[in-house]
Amino acid sequence: MEEVLKVSNLTKIFRLSNRQKKINKTKENVKVAVDDLSFSAYKGEIYGLLGPNGAGKTTTLRIISTLIKADKGDAFVNGVSVRNNPKEIRKMIGFLTSELKLEDFFTPEYLFDYFSNLHGIAPDVREERKHKLFSKFGVDTFKEVKVGNLSTGMKQKVSLIISLVHDPDFIIFDEPTNGLDVITAKTVTDFLLDLKAQGKTIILSTHIFSLVEKLCDRVGIIFDGKMIVSDTLANLTAQSDLESVFFNLYEREGQRQ
Amino acid sequence: MKNILTILKKELRRFFTDYRMLLTLFLPGIIIYLMYTFMGDFISRSMEVDPTYQYAVYVYNLPDKYSVLLESQEFKISTVETDLTLDEAKNKIENKELQLAVIFEDDFENKVTQGLTPDVEIYYNSSSTESLYIYRFFYSVLSADGSEITYDFKVNMEEGVNYDLATKEDTSITMITMIAPYLLVMFLFSGCMALSSESIAGEKERGTIASLLVTPVDRKEIATGKVLALSITSLASAVVSFVGLIASLPKLMGAQGDLTINMYKFDTYLEIFVIIVITVIVFTVILSIISTLSKSVKEAAQYSSLVMILVVLLGLTSMTGVDGIATDFYLYLIPVYNSVQILSSIFALEMSVTNFVVTVVSNLIYIVLGIFALSKMFQSEKIMFNK
């Protein structure tokens, strides 16, 4: 199996402000958001990062997508270091998260062209890709409407398309179906399977068990920034369903602490 | 009553524990104090004359009684040869070679004694601080004396005679030099402030900047693109402000007499345009840095208004007028101040090429450094994702 992503001993520590200490009800000056995390994802598979809120899923994905830097460890996409070569990484990956918003003032059509240009996509390739993606997600009908006037589902579709303007082989989706109605959510999950069928490698962060069971080949479960288990979905669910596995691990970790 | 107190306490707690709110509440008072203090200081400084200045005064028929005026402790006065004709003397005053011409009517003493109220004429040039200064001294002494019942004479009372020999151009230059640079710099800053505060801080607040940061675009290119876009837009606003300012100046100052802008030629406008462009970019870079460091548009606007105080104060340095324009080249290394001073010198038609070059080059260096700093900030997760 060809290893596309290798995360090696990744650690991220956040310094807490007085306000954050109050919110987190802690006297500690720092919070270890990601703690010595390691895992790998292979070509053509969907890897699911599963964990409760605040477990460190999004932080891990933000490090891989070069938005923030790790304090220790590194991640490699096709052997390229995230720490040493972030610009190269940005060319290779697609990243979709609720944290990345699109400017309300512009239309999907304009934004697709804008981000395509930033990725250096040739105009003919851009037009072909735009036509394909817009048709698939039904964006054609509102491609000239300003993002600010679109519904949450429509915006999510546009964000998804924009994250793929450069047709990356490695894609990171952080909670891709969050806040979507069932129909849009189905379109998105079907599309993820489509991408997988095309041989793309996908990292998916979620806390929805059914989504992981439906899509993922391999699963990593994170609690408090630590990777508790990382294995194939088949191995993890050999004895019981994913939800039971998750809560058994959760209780075990709780007792350990 | 208890509820009122509870609400009162909560509201006061809200106001007095938020430093930004406190800043907004008390800053205007501080600004007013600083502005008026500086303004007063600059205006009085513009009226000051070097105490060692040697005044050249043309006198004609000076009575013995007033020869003491020429020996005043306050002024170092040298009289010029009286073989000049009055027209020649006036010409010299107009060209600022002479500061004053005091003409007493022939047979002045006798006419006063006979109660014939003779005339005294004092010619001066109001566009010269020195001329105005010595004129005020002579006029106050003579007009006070001339109003005595037993010693009656008229000072500058002849109808239709223009005693102020300042040319229309000189008067205009004096007024424009004092006011235009200040107004222009304020317009430029306001235009930039409206856009820059919203731009980067707004994108951070709305989460749209992150979409840009995950693309392979170099951070320097993002910074340069943003600064240029903001500069072009601010510049468009600045050009409109400038045209409006120049067109309205003669009308604005109409009360001060006839003003003209005819002395300014194409090269003057070109020089002003270069300074406007460079100043707009400097402002944009400064405000973009503030916007990047701020967590929200509101915070960016608050910090920018603090910088605005500084810009106002630096802008007020133009109030010293033509005589107060900085001459030392190293003063033209100070951003914003250099723009104000070089604009003053351009409006005064006394621009030094060296100082112009120092202003442009130093500002270009600050722009490059600022863009470099911005690109570094775009790489900092602490700055870009601080909430």
Image (cartoon, coloured by chain):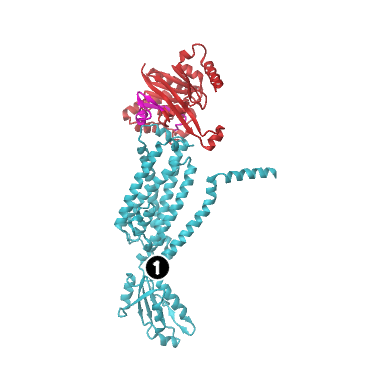
Residue shown at 32% from the left, 51% from the top: B360
- Residue B95 on the magenta span: no
Count of numbered labels shown in the rendering: 1
Quick one: B214 or B85, which is closer to the camera? B214
Q: Colour of chain A?
A: red
Residue B129, visible in the rendered structure: yes
Amino acid type at image mark 1? Val
> In what element is the residue under mark 1?
loop
Position of residue B347 relative to residue B6, above or below, is: below
> Residue A62's spot in the image, x, y percent?
43, 29
Which residue in the structure is indicated by mark 1?
A: B49
Q: Output the letter for the chain in cyan.
A: B
Q: Residue at x 48, y 16 (%)?
A: A213
Q: Nearer the viewer, residue B284 or A109?
A: B284
Q: Residues within 10 Å of mark 1 (few under 14, many from 20)?
A: some
Indicate the chain on which mark 1 is placed.
B
- Span of residues in magenta: A73-101
Lateral position of residue A31 relative to residue A86, left or right = right
Q: Residue furthest top?
A: A239
Q: Position of residue B71 (x, y in %)?
A: 39, 78
Q: Position of residue B219 (x, y in %)?
A: 37, 37
